[in-house]
Image (cartoon, rainbow, N blue to C red):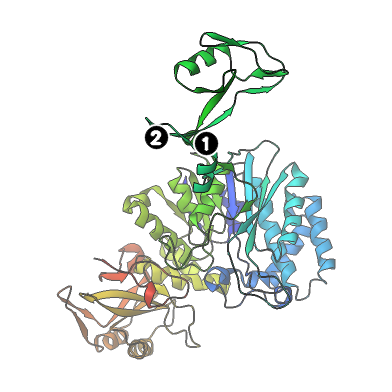
Amino acid sequence: MKTLYYGDNLEILRNKIPDNSVDLCYIDPPFNSKRSYFQIYNNIGGSEDKAQAQAFVDTWTWDDRAIEGYTEITTNLNGRFTKQAIELIRGLELVLGGKTNNDLLAYLVHMTLRVTEIFRVLKPTGSFYLHCDPTASHYLKLVLDAVFVSQGGDYQNEIIWQKIRYAKAQSLAFPKLHDVIFFYSKSKSFVFNRQYSEPDENYTKKYYSQVEPDTGRRYQLACFFQGGQGTAKWFGDRLLEPPPGKHWIWTQEKITDAMENGLLVFTDPDKPRVKKYLENHKGGTIGTIWTDIPPLNAVARERMGYPTQKPEALLERIIKASSNPGDVVLDAYCGCGTTVAVAERLNRQWIGIDITYHSIGLILKRLVDAYGEQILSEITVDGIPQDMAAARALANRYDDRVRKEFEKWAVLTYTKNRAVINEKKGADKGIDGVVYFASGPGKTERMVIQVKSGGANRGTIATLKGDMQRERAELALLITMDEPTKPMLEEAKNAGVYEHALMGRSYDRIRIVTVREMIEKDARIDLPLSYDAVKPGKKGADDLQMRIDL
């Protein structure tokens, strides 16, 4: 099972994922840690972290969707919710000041709906990790208790991940340095593999100070007895009594083997000690304070440009701890696909869900870059338009946050997931995306892209020509749902041609591609692309990686 779902995770959890089918679920739902309590109550959403959060901005506003979710919980629609969850949401309504303009309550309703479904899809031995910001973690823990503990599940840990070593001083408050990760299990019996930290150099020198001359193996000498009276044992040709009230830790047979293999050392004639080698030392047991996993820096190889991307080391620890090879790992807010990428590397089955095609495209490219094109044959992508009816349905969604995904799907599909999506379009809807292509040795140019789900005409092409000139792009592309008219084709032709020195051919400066051609004829960009990764976050000149794809 390697499946990416494109769509609302609540709908997908309810309709696509069966009961008791997931071994481990990790989620990092969008929540902006930079906002104060006042802002949380009054201004959840906005422009910051837009690449991840924009699809959920409206969810955090007390609107029709929030009202629908609140009603569903408090009336226990279809018997999905525990008594504790129902009473909690009613109580939070009172605590947080009622429903009117209550954005935090909207967020908690959103999470209660989804945590309820996550509990359902987990196997009895399954585990759940919720990654959140400390700002609202206390409310989220109440939600988790109301869903998990009330149904026989159990709270296991609150993990503190120190993601920042140092921070600038803030007025009237300590700097925020950490995230919170809640760990719950569906039952008292769950999968858990203890994790160990690597011993550092100082620890090694202090506690494994002995070195075998012949092998160079480091070791320490450990005590060979434990409490509780025992009998004498043969150590070679000597019969030795253990100290009073103690017993030798090994059987006679094991002692004999150890003596033959040089594993016992006598620091005192009557007191054997056993060699414990460094290579057999697992390290220190990892607890609930994680200070050894730094955040991604600007030059990290795994960095995708995603605003809230988590390091692979963080997910590796969680996945190793709470699953085994072959198990199913779910991320219902999979973003740039860190959970998916690590699960694939660790030989787990996986399910990823995201409401933005931008994320789906980014994940697919991430996997292709890591494992080659052949991995696409192993992956099922659900929810992506496969025919014209599905494309029109996506384009005509009444919900604007989803309808805009049609534009992203069109841009990223045509450019093989290598375009940059324009998140800051003007009132005229402007440019939907930009793709960078190699025009010669060490030289790159741009093609601007616009998507029209309907109403395209000659004026659309004329405007696109002006946009191309304004953006200093060499090429422009219109992706249209409808077949282009003759005047549109004439206007595009009048824009002239671009001579591509590297390819040794000419291209129409303005090209028109229909959605039908993309779906039925697999029409895709045929330029040598130079932008190596989809970068949903802010980009600078240093982000451009000049690897050419022919």
Q: Amino acid at mark 1?
A: His
* Residue farthest to the left, as pictured: 504
Looking at the image, residue 245 sits to the left or right of residue 438; the answer is right
Q: In this orientation, which residue lies closer to the viewer: 487 or 323?
A: 323
- Residue at 51 percent across and 13 percent down: it is 256
Q: In this orientation, which residue lies closer to the viewer: 31 or 207?
A: 207
Residue 262 position, x and y percent, is: 46, 21
Residue 540 position, x and y percent, is: 41, 77
Above/below status of 227 relative to 377: above
Q: Which residue is mark 2?
A: 216
What is the secondary structure assignment of the residue under circle 2?
loop
Q: In this orientation, which residue lies closer to the viewer: 436 or 294?
A: 294
* Residue farthest to the front, as pictured: 269
Q: Which mark is residue 281?
A: 1
What is the secondary structure assignment of the residue under circle 1?
loop
- Residue at 65 percent across and 68 percent down: it is 176
Residue 396 appears in view: no
- Residue at 71 percent across and 37 percent down: it is 188
Q: Which mark is residue 404?
A: none
Quadrant where the C terminus sits is bottom left
Image-quadrant location for residue 486: bottom left
Residue 267 position, x and y percent, is: 55, 25
Looking at the image, residue 537 sits to the left or right of residue 246; the answer is left
Residue 84 appears in view: yes
Q: Give the alpha-carbon distance from disc 1 to disc 2, as whole Å.
A: 16 Å
Q: Earlier in the sequence, mark 1 or mark 2?
A: 2
Above/below status of 410 relative to 203: below
Badge 2: residue crowd in 10 Å (few <14, some 14–19, many ≥20): few
Badge 1: residue crowd in 10 Å (few <14, some 14–19, many ≥20): few
Q: Amino acid at mark 2?
A: Gly
